[in-house]
Image (spheres, rainbow, N blue to C red):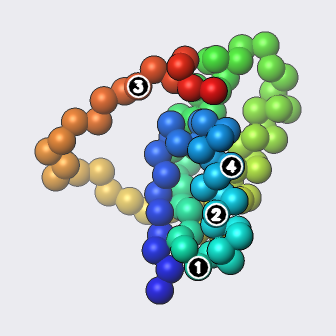
Amino acid sequence: MTTRVLADSNVLYSKTLRDWLILLQLESGGGLYELCWTEDILAEAMYHYRRNNPTVDGGVVTTIRDQIAGSLEGGRIDDFVIDDSFLGSDRTISTSTLP
């Protein structure tokens, strides 16, 4: 059984990390893992991309978003529950330092 992986938005925002994860998935034929995504994660990645690239045409943002969604073979996760079972911290990183 292939492991399903849910990448966080900061991973999908970084072109280098995103390209490596997708390339590894494709080159392994999906045997290593399948990358999954949620609309929330993709929206957050695109928000940071737009914030750091305010003059880029809307078509560029749309193309990046559609390419990410089309490349993540694990598919979109639609139904998930947010609860308070995670006791750690989810610190926000500054994406201005990301490529």
Which residue is found at the position 68% from the left and 49% from the top? 19
Q: Nearer the viewer, mark 4 or mark 3?
A: 4
The image's mark for residue 54 is: none
Residue 57 image point, x, y percent: 84, 23
Task: Return the residue at label 2.
Answer: 24
**Helix, strand or loop at disc 1?**
loop
- The amino acid at mark 2 is Leu
Question: Residue 96, position in %: x, y?
Answer: 55, 17
Instruction: Report the amino acid beneath label 1.
Output: Gly
Residue at which label 3 appears: 93
The amino acid marked with disc number 3 is: Ile
Q: Mark 2 or mark 3, which is nearer the start of the sequence?
A: 2
Q: Is residue 58 left or right of residue 35?
A: right
The residues tagged by marks 3 and 1 sit, at their Cα atoms, a distance apart of 31 Å
> How far apart are the alpha carbons under marks 4 and 3?
20 Å
Query: Are dots 4 and 2 in contact, CB under 8 Å?
Result: no
Other-residue count near label 1 (Cα within 10 Å), few / some / many at <14 / 14–19 / ≥20: few
Marks 3 & 2, CB-CB < 8 Å contact: no
Cα separation, mark 3 vs mark 2, equals 25 Å
Q: Which of disc 1 and disc 2 is earlier in sequence?
A: 2
Distance from the alpha carbon under mark 2 to that under mark 1: 9 Å
Residue 56 lies in what quarter of the image?
top right
Q: Identify residue for label 1.
A: 31
Bin the neighbour count of mark 2 within 10 Å (Cα to Cα): few under 14, some 14-19, many 20 and up: some
Q: What residue do we see at 47% from left, 70% from top?
A: 4
User: Which residue carries the number 4 mark?
Assistant: 19
Q: Residue at x 30, y 51 (%)?
A: 82
Q: Residue at position x 75%, y 40% from top?
A: 64
The image shows residue 13 at horizontal and vertical percentages of 60, 36
Secondary-structure class at tag 4: helix
